[in-house]
Image: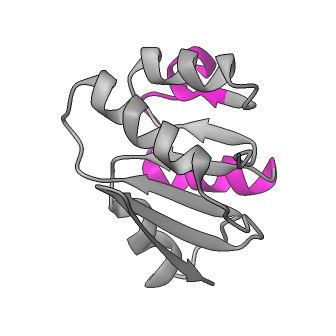
Amino acid sequence: MTILPPLIADANIAFSVVRFLRSQGIDVLYTREEGWQYYEDKEILANAHAMHRFVLTHDSDFGHLAVYLKQPTTGIIHLQPGARPSSEVISDLQDLLRMEVDWKPPMIAVYRSGRLRIRRL
């Protein structure tokens, strides 16, 4: 079982997903709990990088910031697609936790339907 790196969960991640990750021993800060839900993506990415955390999100804008705008990042875990029931997202995360993944930063991981793509930065 893979242990995910420390995370900052974007506001588009349901609290039940955050609760699940914490129950698995994953260190997760939640933007809504931190009062960051109205921060711009670039601010969340900067905070995550300063704290040596990956951003967990359904939003592809984080990848754009890291790849095309060269904003420093520790890492991004992009779960596709968004706007799904949290039970489906939790199921995806259970699958992801069973995979052997080298979470060495900096990187972007995109997970969709059993398929994980990793881009090293």
69 left or right of 26 in image? left
Magenta: main secondary structure equals: helix
Left or right of 57? Residue 50 is right
Measuring 63% from the left and 84% from the top, which residue is drawn there? 121
67 relative to 105, above or below: below
Residue 42 point in image, percent of width and height: 51, 57
Q: Is residue 21 left or right of residue 110?
A: right
Q: Position of residue 56 (x, y in %)?
A: 52, 45
Residue in the foreground of this view, choosing between 97 and 79 = 97
**Left or right of 25, for residue 84:** left
In-front residue for pair 61/57: 57
Residue 3 visible from this viewpoint: yes
Residue 12 visible? The answer is no
In this figure, what is the number of numbered marks? 0
When asked about the image quadrant of residue 27, the answer is: top right
Q: Position of residue 10 (x, y in %)?
A: 47, 37
Picture residue at 42% right of the left edge, 30% below the top: 90
Q: Which residues are magenta?
A: 29-51
- Single out the residue that lies furthest toward the left: 83
Please report the residue visible at 58 percent of the width from the left and 73 percent of the height from the top: 71
